Amino acid sequence: MSLSTDLCAPLAVLGHDVQVPLATGEKVGYAALDYAASAPALQRVWDDVAAYAPYYGSVHRGAGYLSQLSTDLFEQSRRTVADFLDLREGDQVVFTRATTDSLNLLAGALPAGTRVFAFETEHHASLLPWRHAGLTVEYLRAPRSHAEAVAALDAALAAGSPDGPRLLCVTGASNVTGELWPIAELTETAHRHGARVVLDAAQLAPHHRLSVRELDVDWVAFSGHKLYAPFGAGVLAGRSDWLDAAEPYLAGGGASRTVAREADGSVAVEWHTGPARHEAGSPNVIGAYAIASACRALTEAGFDALEAREQALVERLTAGLAGIPEVKVLNLFGERSARVGVLSFVVRGWNSSHFSAALSAEYGIGVRDGLFCAHPLVRTLLGGEEAAPSACGAPEPSLPGERSLNAIRVSFGAGTPEEHVDRFLAAVRELVTDGARWSYRNEGGRCVADTDRAA
């Protein structure tokens, strides 16, 4: 797709007209290019939440009209999410706080003795929850192609005992490189060996149509705040058997069907089955409704159009960065690998924290720098190469003897205008060619412009 391709209009998001201060004291429209961390809320979602807010009421526990209305809204939101994910008959939707919460919930529900497999390339939310007593974890080396990923999983599953439950946790799209993983092939391989699969869709669901039925994964997890909904809610959806057999994630009201005192003074509890088993306490109705609203908005906008528009922006970005010799784009599967609107890079001669700070202070562009909660992956991609020194400092090294490793991540989505990508590319070229116009210092561990001193 050429750089002159006309794109459909971006979806309306909150903050599109926010003005932010530059180091000069001037203000400029903010270019939000950190969608992979948290996407701005869709205006449609915010309007839906605002319309519901006056009717806020307790859920599942009230006889009054507002309680009944809120209960209906909460359960309808569950059905909307199920439709968005194209779940199978018998699958369930559990509302959580975020992807991290969802995967920790599932980890606590795994049968004792489960062996978990995860590639070292995962986000920490997918890499760390399985360190539970009674579980064993095998971390697979970073693959350099889709075929290598499938072969590595096949070999790992074939090498171990086929007895006992096994689970693969894998991302749909990398939060570092944006690259798409071969989910269907990995799932087929896992199922052939009798293993189950949980898909971390935090970076996939906002960008691509997602069908649990077609991919045949056993569970999927994602966060509302990456799906253009406000913070505070997430989803774990999929098979019910292990969830219904596990102790509740939280013990309390809502999860319990009956509670009674025993003759010996103890308390006997009968737990619910289904989503209520793991949703103890008063649920986040607004969070669930916001996710459902985002699901409806994306579905109505049409994922074919959204994906085509995003891919045009990806091509615009990658072509622009390819024309800057000092920029090295990080890839796991190669330069031509398919990706969503997420890309990380380093700039020769620059510390990434310094470069990111200059993008913000001098151009009003928000990106992210660091290791992106995927430390093993970024180390692999950087090959142990240290970041350039910077007067303003950089994130503290996380391994003894390692001076500094960090990269820059730019990410976008359905609410990103073309102008933001073009402004970003122009800023990168100018910084590489002319350098920063301001001096920078370390403040609270972050690199910030010293507004009293030009460079």
Image (cartoon, helix red, strand yellow):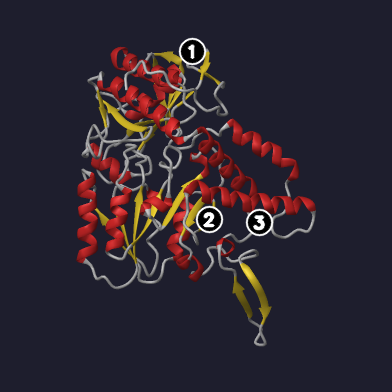
How packed mark 1 is, by other alpha carbons closer than 10 Å (few <14, some 14-19, many 20 or more), is some
Q: CA distance from mark 1 to mark 2?
A: 49 Å
Q: CA distance from mark 3 to mark 1?
A: 48 Å
Q: Amino acid at mark 1?
A: Thr
Q: Tell me which numbered mark, 3 or 2, is placed earlier along the sequence.
A: 2
Considering every residue shown, the one lying at the far right of the view is 64
Q: Tell me which numbered mark, 1 or 2, is placed earlier along the sequence.
A: 1
Q: Measured from the top left, where is residue 403 in percent x and y?
A: 27, 37
Give the camera-side residue of 47 and 230. Answer: 47
Q: Secondary structure at mark 3?
A: loop
Q: Measured from the top left, where is residue 259 in percent x and y?
A: 66, 75
Q: Amino acid at mark 2?
A: Val
Give the camera-side residue of 336 and 372. Answer: 336
Residue that appears at 63% across and 81% down? 266
Q: Secondary structure at mark 1?
A: loop
Figure check: 450 above or below 86: above
Q: CA distance from mark 3 to mark 2?
A: 17 Å
User: Which residue is disc 1 drawn over?
Assistant: 24
Q: How many marks?
A: 3
Label 3–label 2 contact, CB within 8 A:
no
Figure check: 385 above or below 160: above
In the image, is 144 to the left or to the right of 92?
Answer: left
Instruction: Tell us which disc is closer to us: 3 or 2.
Output: 2
Residue that appears at 42% across and 52% down? 212
User: Which residue is disc 2 drawn over?
Assistant: 93
Q: Amino acid at mark 3?
A: Ser
In the image, is 397 to the left or to the right of 22?
Answer: left
The quadrant the C terminus occupies is top left
User: Which residue is disc 3 drawn over?
Assistant: 282
Q: Measured from the top left, where is residue 189 in percent x and y?
A: 27, 57
How packed mark 3 is, by other alpha carbons closer than 10 Å (few <14, some 14-19, many 20 or more), is few
Q: Measured from the top left, where is residue 127 in percent x and y?
A: 35, 53
